[in-house]
């Protein structure tokens, strides 16, 4: 009776199902850093700052949802450029922007652009 060997396994999986769904509910929502930019020297910004910043974000687990680009205004005046970077949490985003590596890169970025950065918590999965 090979079928009888599988009954305990199937029963165990059914008993674990409520715990699996509660683990999913406990997952943290991702965070999104919104970066408003006014780039004064696009060529130097693209060559000297952006690759450094992108590397720092990637090493921190961040990924660009939107790379720096001009937005389309719906209401009022839009910033000149906006970038959106996804991080695993608000804490991770704050750590990344406060890191020595980013602060050093930002000294270069400040030569070529003005920044306004804020972080939002995404909807829970």
Image: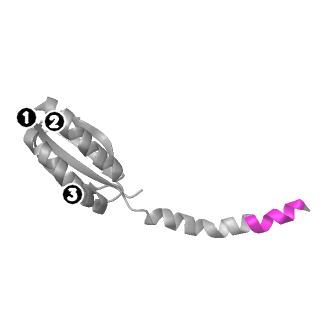
The main secondary structure of the magenta stretch is helix
Which numbered mark, 2 or 3, is in the foreground of this view? 3
72 falls in the magenta region? no
Q: Mark 1 points at which residue?
A: 40
Mark closer to the chain start, 1 or 3? 1
**Left or right of 71 in this view: 19:** right
* 120 horizontally vs 107: left or right: right
Q: Decide if residue 96 is on the left or right side of residue 30.
A: left
> Relative to 87, is 9 on the left or the right?
right
The numbered mark at residue 45 is 2
Q: Which mark is residue 83?
A: none
The answer to whether any part of residue 50 appears in the image is yes
Residue 23 x, y percent position in the rendering: 50, 66
Magenta residues?
2-9
118, 39: nearer the viewer: 39
Query: Residue 71 in the image: x percent, y percent?
Result: 19, 35
Q: How far apart are marks 1 and 3 (CA)?
A: 24 Å
The answer to whether the residue labelled 1 contacts the one labelled 2, judged by CB atoms less than 8 Å apart, is: yes
- Considering only order in the chain, which callout, 3 or 2, is on the residue closer to the N terminus? 2
Please name the residue shown 20% across and 59% down the image.
98
Where is 49 relative to 101, above or below? above
Residue located 79% across and 65% down the image: 7
Q: For the C terminus, which image quadrant?
A: bottom left
How far separated are the C-alphas under marks 2 and 3? 19 Å
| Residue 40 to residue 60: above or below | above
In the rendered image, residue 103, in percent from the top left (x then y), is placed at 17, 54
Which residue is label 3 attached to? 100
């Amino acid at each position: 009776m090979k079928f009888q060997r599988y009954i305990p396994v199937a029963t165990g999986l059914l008993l674990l199902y409520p715990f699996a769904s509660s683990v999913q509910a406990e997952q943290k929502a991702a965070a999104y850093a919104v970066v408003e930019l006014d780039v004064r020297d696009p060529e130097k910004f693209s060559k000297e700052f952006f690759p450094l910043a992108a590397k720092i974000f990637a090493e921190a687990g961040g990924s660009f949802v939107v790379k720096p680009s001009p937005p389309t205004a719906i209401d009022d005046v839009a910033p000149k450029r906006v970038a959106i970077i996804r991080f695993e949490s608000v804490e991770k985003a704050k750590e990344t922007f406060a890191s020595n590596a980013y602060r050093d890169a930002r000294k270069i970025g400040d030569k070529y652009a003005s920044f306004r950065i804020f972080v939002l918590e995404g909807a829970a999965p």
